[in-house]
Amino acid sequence: MKILLALFIFVNLISLSLQIPIKKDHNLHTFKSIFQNLGAHSSTGCTICKGLVEILHGVGSTGLGEGELINIATKICLKAKIEDNNVCNSVTREFADELWYVLMDAALQPEKICGWIFGDSCLHYVDYFPSWNITIPPRTRPATNSWKTQKSNVNPKKILHFSDTHIDFDYLQGSNAVCNEPLCCRPVNGKAGPNDTAAPKWGFPGNCDANPLLVNNLFNHIALAHEDAEYIYWTGDVPAHNVWNQSREDQIFTVKQATKLLVQYFPHKKVFPALGNHEGAPVNSFPPPYITGQQSLSWLLDTLAEDWTTWLPKDTEETIRRGGFYTVLVEEGFRVISLNMNYGNDGNWWLWINSTDPAGQLQWLADTLYKAEQNNEKVHILGHIPPSGTLLWFRFNYYRIVDRFHDTIAAQFFGHTHHDEFSLFYHSEDTEVPNNIAYIGPSVTTYNNMNPGYRTYDVDGPSTNATWNVINHDTFYAEIQKTDDTHPPEWLHEYNVKEAYGMKDLSPGEWHGLIQRMYNDPELFQIMFKAYRKQYKYDTCDTLKCRRSFLCGMMDGPFKSCDLSAEEYVIFERFRAQASTNC
């Protein structure tokens, strides 16, 4: 019986950790089905469930439980050939402390887990991710539409955005670029032979991350080509994808090295960071403040508070140390809010203990936006994981906040998927009317199967009554396969959004209209689809069903749904799985 539970836990854990694509909530359904299939009747399954959990707790009380679980899980990983020996032996130990804490001290209690699986016929039903709501201040003034009042700005503010750097300091030219592990191009993969693919000097668009040479080349290019950019949005994921053997010391080293690079290349620019899911050790591990002691997140948050205040005012330290989020009044009438989206991350095991507004972040967000509204400020929200990729009640409350403050939030900026995307938000009372937009920026890393890229935004500000709306943006990339020992990356202008898509402005209504046009204009759609992977040719989407499925992913939130057929939904899930594979 213990093996069945270990199989579920670690197969799903390894799948999540190593980015093996699985459907949303697939792990939860699998967990239930394993137990429910143990007996033909729920009473039998209930008895088995309670007995199994008691056995696990008994093993845990001996002090040998965690080691036993590691041994069982490692054997299953090897026998099922989930990954190679190195990864199987490392990943179970990487996640053991966190998972054992969550399971033994919180989640795996008979009265909870068996009631959750079998319902009230077994024990009182417990929902590990119950509904919750924050308090959103009511309106005290009518909503406004800044796009109707915005005047032409001949001197906009320029903002740089790069995301998902994923610097691999162990990248080794000449090593195997195609290997049996989730991340390649490293010394452990061995030297490439005559029939192997060798890791090139500047990078490889497969299962390899950005090496320091590429990142330095990019930052040097940006420093020279975009001197007019005043602010930088840096939306997380700094460490590489070797998630099966990362330590806290590894993550701190990478974050500090990246901070030094930014200071070196952009000494006079203000940088506004956001926390990615890969900064945790292990990956996706972000215990809320109620977890104290050795398992707490203070090791990372204290480091971020120290490094981020290189650019941020000291008064941001309190919320950074509490939960990895902050707000800054950048200049009169313009505020930046940076969120820790890992408190909604469905791969964050700590949320099994309590997922209700961790660190009070979303209540803080609503209160901060209300104060901004009262002070006539416009706000840019930064984060790493787009809200569509978070737990149900986290994203529902986030959507409620955006719906309420849509005229205060000028734009949102995320990363995480590695793709060039956007997400439209819609009114709760009229689901055909978009009211806000999130820009999902392209990744610097080439992981996996894409070119490196970055973006600049033209923003309406500063001026009297500036809207701080994004009025245009330009995206840049390098064709990594055209580099070699003597030819460094050439950073090319990929597209200007208004010119490429024939948009008169970048209002939510124009973005909605673009989606509608793309349904019936395959050529226009292909411009976007090629930009999705930054011009790297990997897959195709040349049917109406594929277009409908892809474009559905651009319309976000519970207030807007797509009428997809079963076949189209399968395609939709495939695109979402691609994104989760990269993250």
Image (cartoon, rainbow, N blue to C red):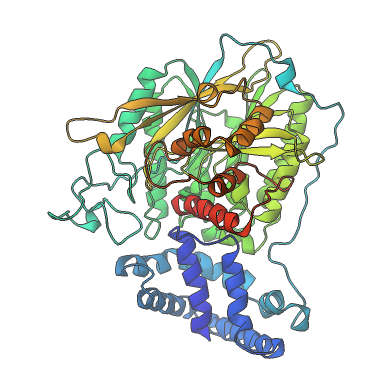
Q: In which image quadrant can residue 451 be found?
A: top left
**For the view shown, which residue lies furthest in the top direction?**
154
Between residues 543 and 433, which one lies in front from this camera angle? 543
Q: In which image quadrant can residue 521 be found?
A: top right
Residue positioned 18% across, 55% down in the render:
196
501 shown above or below 119: above
Between residues 406 and 318, which one lies in front from this camera angle? 406
Q: Position of residue 103 (x, y in %)?
A: 58, 71
Q: Can residue 442 be seen in the rendering of this structure?
A: no
129 shown above or below 442: below
**For the view shown, which residue lies furthest in the left direction?**
194
Q: Can residue 36 be seen in the rendering of this structure?
A: yes
Side of 38 where 225 appears, left or right: left
Label total for image: 0
Q: Position of residue 310 (x, y in %)?
A: 48, 29
Q: Position of residue 527 (x, y in %)?
A: 47, 33
Residue positioned 20% across, 49% down in the render:
198
Residue positioned 38% across, 18% down in the render:
225
Side of 213 where 529 appears, left or right: right
Q: Position of residue 233 (x, y in %)?
A: 51, 30
